[in-house]
Amino acid sequence: MIEQVHVHILHFNLNNRIIIEMKKLPIAALILLAFFSCTKSTTELKTKSVRLITVDPGHFHAALVQKTMYADVDSIVHVYAPAGSDLQLHMTRIESYNKRNEDATHWKEQVYTGSDFFEKMIEEKKGNVVVLSGNNQKKTEYILTALQNGFNVLADKPMVIDSKDFEKLTYAFEDAKKNKVVLYDIMTERFEISTILQRELSLIPEVFGQLEKGTPENPAITKESVHHFYKYVSGSVLTRPAWFLDSSQQGEGIVDVMTHLVDLVQWECFPEQVIDYKNEIAIHSAKRWPTDITLSEFKAITKLEDFPDFLKSKVVNDSTLQVYCNGEINYTIRNVHARTSVIWKYKAPEGTTDTHYSIMRGTLANLVIRQGAEEQYKTTLYIEPVHHDVNYEQVLSEKLKQIQSQYAGVELKKSDKGWEVVIPEKYKEGHEAHFARVTEKFLEYLKEDNMLAWEVPNMITKYYTTTKGLEVALEGKQ
């Protein structure tokens, strides 16, 4: 009798998705299967230096990393995750990118769903880049362990959600340096064109002057982001996992979306400079508050019929879930006053979307990004002079050429308080496209071994600011 063994079998469905199953096969068949599998993968790996591993992709950002193909990245992606709706939604999104009519991708997902998925990932080491975007409760531990085992890590924000794990994150960066691997987080907002131009204009003294110091009541830089639970992603209504509404798993808004805003404060106010969190950051006040989600709203965004047990302690009046997703931090960075605010609502009014407000106050002009009704909810950048100066317009027109040399087609249009910066549509890629931009920057750092000197210390400073801000808010210091 021919001996049989259990083996993971890979087979392709009609959508080029690799499915893993457990079956019994004769040893002879197993040897033949191994030969053909190794022949294919070895050939491809010779030409592709980066092999992605996706771990427990509970958040849709994991799929957005794969919305495009990359020259040096293997088309086979190994996925390690528990079986369930989170994994299925991820696979469905990847499948939709593979099947779309224009710029279709050709990812092949190789999936392992055992309860020991993370340990199996470490053991098998099928790739060299771990992508993390999901439940944040264990993310910092996943990051640390992956780095200690020689993997590079591309992690969605936030990499840490409380002060307790912040120290663990600092160890993670030490391990990355020791093991000569890269740890990087996905900061998509650096690639939004209005923010880029706000930064570029602030670097022209004749236009902006110098950054004000500001006060707690009137900060030098303010950033406010409004998000919605009910939204469309890649053309479809987004299904939120129930844990996304549990702050102990997702993290409160003050440490989640706030990560982007704090990052932009550093990136715009002190470009390419190292910020020392121990001496140059001071949290003065912070606050947090909930968004109420009714049971019917919860059903609409999760497709579940009731609140799961882990959320019931946060339910009031038997039918309203309180989600602590809103927050504000007032702090100084190198003695410059900054305010960052995150607000979550259930659903945006018809015709609107997530919105962003930002102001940088200079001694000559304020640079303001608005996205309200007057702007038809489209991100719009304004230059608003602080003082009346008859020569300012001439100087501005001359200095605009510096911007136009890099961003051809950018123009100015008179507005009530100054000028609107008119940006050609070709630069407005959209949020989903920015995931490819971040991934390309990560791959550049990986390939060229040229991580900029300020990136790591400023990531650490960013997460100190958000986690310390939450700590202050929990203490009730407003």
Image: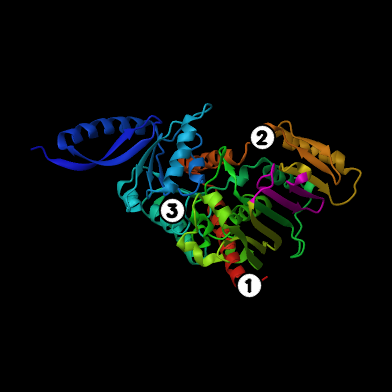
User: Decide: marks 3, 1 in contact (CB < 8 A)?
Assistant: no
User: Looking at the picture, does residue 465 appear above or below residue 231?
Assistant: below
Which residue: 49% across, 67% down?
Answer: 164
Q: Nearer the viewer, mark 3 or mark 1?
A: 1
Q: CA distance from mark 2 to mark 1?
A: 42 Å
Q: Is residue 270 shown to the viewer in this render? A: no
Front residue of 6/280: it is 6
Residue at the farthest top position: 101
User: Looking at the picture, does residue 43 appear above or below residue 444?
Assistant: above
User: Decide: marks 2, 1 in contact (CB < 8 A)?
Assistant: no
Magenta segment boundaries in residue numbering: 347-373
**362 in magenta:** yes
- The mark tally for this picture is 3
Residue 367 in picture, x, y percent from top left: 76, 48
- Residue hosting label 2: 427
Does 42 sit left or right of 345 as displayed? left
Q: Which amino acid lies under the numbered mark 3 shown in the image of this protein?
A: Ala
Q: Residues within 10 Å of mark 1 (few under 14, many from 20)?
A: few
- Residue hosting label 1: 476
Q: Which amino acid lies under the numbered mark 2 shown in the image of this protein?
A: Tyr
- Residue hosting label 3: 176
Secondary structure type for disc 2: helix
Q: Quadrant of the N terminus?
A: top left
Secondary structure type for disc 3: helix
Q: Earlier along the polypeptide chain: callout 3 or callout 1?
A: 3
Residue 146, labelled with which disc?
none
